[in-house]
Amino acid sequence: MGLQWGDEGKGRVVDYISDRYDAAVRFNGGANAGHTVVVNGKRVVFHLLPSAALRGKMLFIGAGVAVDPQRLIEEYSEVRPGHLKIDPRATVTTPFDVWLDGRLEELRGSRIGTTGRGIGPTYANRLYRLSPRVCDVAAGRDPDFGPLYAAFGYNEGLSGWSKAYSEFLKQHMGDVPQELMSLYESGRALLFESAQGTLLDPIYGTYPFVTSSNTIAPYVSIGAGFPFNLVDEVIGVMKAYQTRVGAGPFFTELSGPLADRIRERGGEYGSTTGRPRRVGWLDLVSVRYAVKLNGATKIALTKLDVLSGLGRLLVAVRYRYDGKSTLDFTRALYEQPEPEYVELDPIPDVDWASAVKDRRLPGEALQLIDLIEKEAGAKVWLVSVGQERSMAVEL
Ligand code: IMP
Ligand code: MG
């Protein structure tokens, strides 16, 4: 689960642990996600397939995912996974959704800065009962709402649109909840990979600057049809600093040369859209909120190396409203807090490859980890200092 605004490095962490699992499942989001995995120096970005796709796992796409068939087929053709099952109930993103996403951004007055992948309209049109499901497209049933589309100003029409995708979807449709349960009952290990992060949750995040499917762990029950009470571990993934792509509040945001430096070192450019990400100091008030909402049992900390050699290290540990110091994040959803920072000894530039090989992180890094554990309320289990699988250490 992402504990920030997405791009925490979930793809990287999934790749690290994927050997321990038999199956990988997507249960939320759609092609807005961009999960980067580096294997043998080769960088692969997954949007719809689970990021364990390169590791030969059984793959599942649950009913909570917004399925863009064109993009899915493209990704599938590149990776050619052996086992891919898609829930027939999942909502399909149509060209109307993608068009409407752009149109709403134009007309809303204030842009959210969506990824333009039709995500908001896909989930909204599902609730309007306009969207086709995977099983509809597989059966060649085109969404046939010409007059309604025209009322929105969309005049393309979608008759005949399904045809290109029917065969593929028909081949890959499967009863995802049933298959997951039978795997579970035969003792196999299941890995549910979230897209986006807690602060982008449409209910619990920084609304309206959020995405449109839920991004907290209990959504596994709905988005994959797997009962949450059978989940025995929730791994919260967080970066050692904060980033956000798109508009919306960002309480610890940095600007100027320091921000540029973190952005360049961390390669902080959107993996779906290429947009430069906004960057800022780690915000443990929001991370703590995210740990609790997800029921995170442990933390994977990524990109710790990016903070090294900056000469300065601040971490927000409290918010102040009307001059009063508190741990309350909920209030920040409707009032502007002033972050209260602690200053830590800056992390020096070290040879991270040997640091992980010898399992010896610099003392300054350990201080940061202690602070995270104390303030966020969960143990840091994995520390990643690079994209390759070997560049991580379990504590
Ligand atoms: P949408 O999900 O495309 O509707 O975009 C809504 C907001 O969520 C925008 O601020 C996007 O930048 C952000 N967002 C959506 N998906 C991701 C992601 O995978 N990583 C980071 N931000 C995302
Ligand atoms: Mg991403």
Image (cartoon, rainbow, N blue to C red):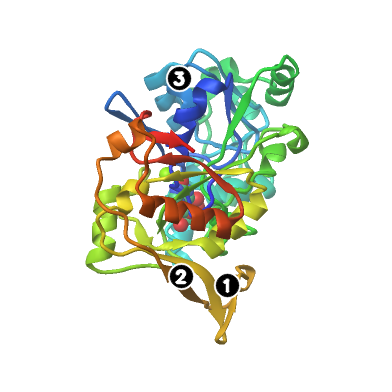
**Residue 42 shown left or right of residue 217 in the figure:** left
Sequence-first disc among 2 and 1: 2
Q: Residue at x 24, y 52 (%)?
A: 264
Query: Marks 1 and 3, how far apart in space?
Result: 40 Å
Q: Nearer the viewer, residue 7 or 394?
A: 394
Q: Nearer the viewer, residue 72 or 259?
A: 259
Would you say 188 lies left or right of 391 here? Answer: right
Say what secondary structure mark 2 lies in.
loop
Residue identifier under label 2 = 251
Say whether residue 211 is left or right of residue 278.
Answer: right
Q: Amino acid at mark 3?
A: Arg
Residues marked 2 and 1 touching at CB (< 8 Å): yes
Please state the horizontal and vertical placement of residue 52, each as a whole percent of the image: 48, 26
- Write the residue at 55% across / 86% down: 323
The percent position of residue 166, horizontal first and vertical second, equals 55, 22
Confirm or reject: label 3 Cβ below 8 Å from ligand 2.
Answer: no
Q: Which residue is mark 3?
A: 55
Say whether mark 1 is within 8 Å of ligand 1.
Answer: no
Q: Position of residue 274 (x, y in %)?
A: 31, 48
| Vertical relation: 68 (above or below) 118 | above
> Residue 77, image x and y in percent?
40, 19
Mark 1 and mark 3 residues within 8 Å of each other at the beta carbon: no
Q: Is residue 29 above or below residue 114?
A: above
Q: Quadrant of residue 176?
A: top right
Q: Secondary structure at mark 3?
A: helix
Tell me the CA gap for discs 2 and 1: 9 Å
Q: Quadrant of residue 218?
A: top right
Q: Quadrant of residue 84?
A: top right
Few, some or many C-alpha atoms within 10 Å of disc 2 (few <14, some 14-19, many ≥20)?
some
Task: Examine the rendered structure and indicate whether residue 166 appears above or below residue 133.
Answer: above
Q: Which residue is mark 1?
A: 332
